[in-house]
Image (cartoon, rainbow, N blue to C red):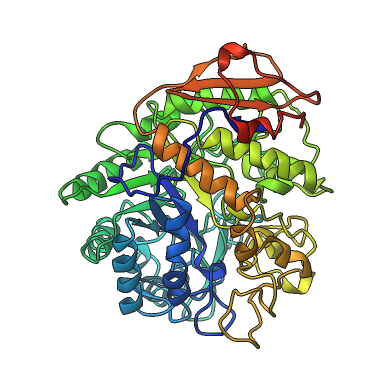
Amino acid sequence: MSHTIERPSRLDTARRAFSWRDAVVYQVYLRSFRDANGDGIGDLGGLSQGLDAIAALGCDAIWLNPCYASPQRDHGYDIADYLTIDPAYGTLEEFDEVVRRAHELGLRVLMDMVANHCSSDHAWFQAALAAEPGSDERARFIFRDGLGPDGELPPNNWDSVFGGLAWTRVTERDGRPGQWYLHSFDTSQPDFDWRHPAVAEHFENVLRFWFERGVDGFRIDVAHGHFKDAALPDHPGGRGPDAGHNHGMWDQPEVHDLYRSWRALGDAYEPEKYFVGEIWVPSPDRLADYLRPDELHNAFSFDLLVQPWNADRFRKAIETGLAVGRGWPAWTLANHDVHRAVTRYGQEQPLDEALPTDMIAAARRRGPADLDRGLRRARAAAALALALPGSMYLYQGEELGLPEVLDLPDAARQDPIWTRSNGTELGRDGCRIPLPWTREGRTFGFSDAAAATTWLPQPAWFGAFARATQAADPDSMLSLHRDLLATRRTHLRGTEPIVWLSPAGAEVLAFRRGDVVVVTNFGSAPFTPPSAWGALSPLLASQPLTGS
């Protein structure tokens, strides 16, 4: 278990000036947050209703997963129109109201920028399909002739992140098999060719459009993508899950000029706009390249998220994150792409010498979970992470201690990962189940309509994790998060670095930051902190540091 040894005597709910360096950002997966119109899908009206709860938790900002117009084949990460709101979620006017209300509550608003690819329904891609090979319409995407006598083989051996080939062949207007187009993810998500000037111009206009509506910044999806090696070489690692990092597909040098241009655009506003990257690269040095002073403000330090429950591994991940992030990384313990923390920490995970090549897949393991143990560990991990320097991204439902829903019926699953892997990968549906707000009711308060059916089925046990119930329980996961965020606001507003109190290799992690001491016991035996570290408060003394 983990505890802050010193804490405020009361909850200080005063708002403070926003800083991207140490903000707590609440990630809103809109489709599953709250439903205001009764159709079983979360929407902007539901978000407006829930903003007070996010502010009361003590967060500084929200990150809104894609709510642009989309056919929803990848639930918003396949965008058909970047300049409007999907009707399932509401209208531009309702979006403006969310921004206004959030700012009124002291919350900044970040949107998701998905610029590596769009939807196959996007007007540009439809025009490309209708155009001839070699046309300017096709040049905005990555169309290539196939290999083999009749072009029947893909242009190279690249795999899609979602499984299967990263290439799909089109049928030309005359009915003949034609060129192939690249999709790093699903077939419905064609990659842009960022070497075409119209693509860069388009996205600068997209950024300005949302900035002018009051959006404060963007989380950049697959920020290490966008540019591909112009030669499109075969991946020397071959195909399959053990192929390793594909250097031709990711992390090309041209991407840094792109972020310099976006940073300059955002810096021209007052206050300046903010960019955080989702970046998966094979070394800390490569990640640090994105965080130069004229590029992204920060990037997610995913090493902490994917670690097994081991003190030494956590410590190394923290030290790496602090070094790469110039002391201010973006931490998270869960998001919409991985299994929930309670389940991950309750599973027996192998302690490999090195992280697996596919770190995301490692955070979506199958297998039974001891949820009591997972909850204890998730509470400890939250206390540890929220005391670290840097920003913290809190995925909706983690503050409730929700477990992953692993036993969804096959027919209910909607994630393209499930489909493209022929069911060998569970995908991400289990962490996207609509939230429980009340203990009772058909949808546990998620929908305002009594007869609504949620877009993914909620299990019968979800009501036990309801926000309303936890709000009245001082020992709940929700109350713990409120206390931790209050401690963070009151004691950890400065630039204090962490000072390790425990030696490397110990089963207990302990560090001091300012006047806060954090102790996390990863071992199996109870632990009593030395008196030199500080005295436990009466509240925490009643919750001894039992083993994990």
Name the foreground residue: 311 vs 416.
Answer: 311
| Residue 303 visible in the shown view | no
Quarter holding the C terminus is top right
Q: Position of residue 470 (x, y in %)?
A: 63, 58
Q: Residue at x 57, y 11 (%)?
A: 532
Residue 353 appears left or right of 383: right
| Residue 28 visible in the shown view | yes
Name the foreground residue: 91 vs 289.
Answer: 91
Q: Position of residue 377 (x, y in %)?
A: 70, 38
Residue 485 appears left or right of 480: left
The mark tally for this picture is 0
Residue 342 appears left or right of 368: left
- Asked if 116 appears above or below 444 in the picture, the reply is above
Q: Residue at x 71, y 67 (%)?
A: 463
Name the foreground residue: 490 vs 282.
Answer: 490
- Asked if 218 appears above or below 171 in the picture, the reply is above
Name the foreground residue: 419 vs 151.
Answer: 419
Q: Residue at x 30, y 43 (%)?
A: 259
- Asked if 300 appears above or below 399 in the picture, the reply is above
Q: Position of residue 489 (x, y in %)?
A: 40, 40
Q: Position of residue 342 (x, y in %)?
A: 70, 47
- Asked if 169 appears above or below 224 in the picture, the reply is below
Quarter holding the N terminus is top right
